[in-house]
Image (spheres, rainbow, N blue to C red):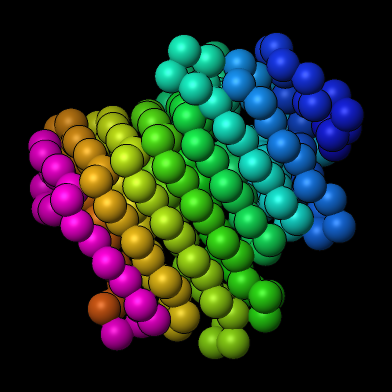
Amino acid sequence: SLDLDDVAANGVVTMPADLKISATKSLSLGAGIDFKADIQDGDNLGIDDSRVEVIVEGALTATGTVALPVKFESAAGVASWWGIACHSGSVVFSGVEIHDAEYGVRSSSGTPGGASISLDGVTVTDCGTAGVSVSTCIVNSHSFIELRNSTIALSSNQLWGVYVAGPSTEVIVDNCTITGSPGSSYGIWSQAASLIAEGWIGRCTISGLTAG
């Protein structure tokens, strides 16, 4: 996989293979770092054996600015890389842009510790399935997502801006804008309200979608 030392400094980082942050590791990214995923995955460490992923089992923190955001993207177009997969541990983003992934950020936790995602001032565009997706796979796992002051722009035929499912998921969506285009379906979607452990959604603008 891509070595963590290779991505510690500012600048453009080409990802020819998966970047994995294991349970004992952490990675902090400063303003101006631009990750560009390759078309094919050279490692196959994660969920998708053909597309590059950022795999988080430890801690990933990225702090950008308006002038110098941290970017995760690909030059190959919509859904050309898998996205950021948080299996456990935490993802904390501020001033970050995510483009052209299958999922912008996805947590699909199957571990008792669960996963935590906190996104503030994040822009997600041109994803294949969902901008942000969080679910828990086992009853004693707890996932948490906090999405504030962020923008998700769905392209044609995308399914969800925010997707939530699982037996123990806590969700906060505050002051966000979710926009769609022809064929995009849901702004915020929950598999069933009874599955969400705790939640708050407010001050959001949702437009251009089949359903809010």
Q: Is residue 150 magenta?
A: no
**Residue 82 placement (x, y as % from top left):** 57, 39
Q: Is residue 113 placed above or below 175 in the rendered structure? A: below
Between 174 and 86, which is closer to the camera in this rendering? 174
- What is the span of residues highlighted in magenta in the rendered image? 194-212
Say whether residue 186 is visible. no
Measured as percent of width and height from the top left, residue 33 is found at 65, 19
Q: Looking at the image, which residue is at 69% across and 13% down?
A: 12
Residue 209 in sight here: yes
Residue 164's place in the image compared with 182, above or below, is below
Measuring from the top left, give residue 81's x and y in whole percent: 58, 32
Q: Position of residue 68 (x, y in %)?
A: 53, 15
Q: Residue at x 75, y 55 (%)?
A: 58
Which residue appears at 52% of the width and 70% of the height? Answer: 143
Relative to 132, does residue 1 appear above or below in the rendering?
above
Q: Is residue 11 left or right of residue 208?
A: right
